[in-house]
Image (cartoon, grey):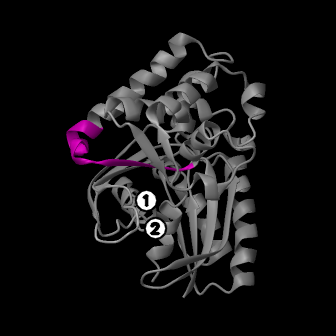
Amino acid sequence: MRVAAVDCGTNSVRLLIADVSDDTLTEVERRMEIVRLGQGVDRTGRLAADALERTFGAMRGYRKLIDQHGAVRTRVVATSATRDAANRDEFAAGVREIFGVDPEVATGSEEAELSFTGATRGLVRLSPETEHPQGPMPPYLVVDIGGGSTEFVLGSAHAEAALSVDIGCVRLTERHLRDAGDPPSEAALEAVAADIEDALDKVTDAVPVERAHTLVGLAGSVTTVAGIALDLPEYDPARIHHARIEGEQIHEVTRRLLAMTHGERAAIPVMHPGRVDVIGVGALILDRIVRRFAFSQVVVSEHDILDGIAWSLI
């Protein structure tokens, strides 16, 4: 069955058109545009008019692709920014007009479940009796670092415990670094780190992280850090997907990013222009997670909530 999955997050809106059966997902088209839907939401509680128009513009292009490829089912899932917005009905009306379906504003736990499915469906661990090397060891702790929130979900074949916390690269950048200079001051970074640690306290209370054997990292902050750590000459999803990045590499990339100016970050070959101003905080969130929970490395996945949405349509 050919399906279309649309994930509208705080920072980006993404499309996956895929042929899906019970046990395979074959990608037909995958697109991403940085629209910054969550611009100012942490401060105002509302979706900005220009942010909505950027998002709807990207979605209109996606609708054309969906029609062109003949997808028979479409699901639109919206996440952190729309959960927080007082005018989310405006967003819903625009989505309905473009796609002909209502957007589903996922709860934090629903978002975590979809992310877990998308990330781990391809991490099937091979039998020890085979001649092939085994994959990453379950249980997995899947961490999806978004623009407005970060999802933590623990499980093996299925999600068993999950929590969404309001730390994301856009939210914390807008909250603490907007006037912090470039590069930001130590005081501003300490404020960001304090928010991260407070959120990780909540994770410790709600999710048995100590059971996890493998940390799986998702979304643009993680894949960008991986591309930098691998010293790629350009963004290469095939090289990044299932790469294993050591904790010390994450720490060093984070240190470098937080010491750079905007122009220096923009010049990094794997950097998407829409991530330049928020990647430092995204990297810091990942670094703090690795340190707090004593993981030696992160397995990076290019498959995430978007793939989970596609799987849910069969």
Q: Position of residue 117 (x, y in %)?
A: 40, 65
204 inside magenta stretch: yes
- Residue 130 locus on image (x, y percent): 34, 72
**Residue 229 visible in image:** yes
Q: Nearer the viewer, residue 204 or 270?
A: 270
Q: Which residue is mark 2?
A: 308
Q: In the image, what residue type sits under mark 2?
A: Gly
Quarter occupied by the C terminus? bottom left
Q: Earlier in the sequence, mark 1 or mark 2?
A: 1
Which range of residues does the magenta coloring cover?
203-219
Camera-side residue of 177 and 118: 118
- Which one is nearer the viewer's eye here, 121 or 280? 121
Q: Amino acid at mark 1?
A: Ser
Q: Are marks 1 and 2 in contact (CB under 8 Å)?
A: yes
Quadrant assignment, res 282: top right
Q: Secondary structure at mark 2?
A: helix
Residue under the point 55% across and 26% down: 252
Q: Looking at the rendered structure, which numbered label has been put on residue 115? A: 1
Q: Residue at x 70, y 55 (%)?
A: 33
Q: Quadrant of residue 241?
A: bottom right
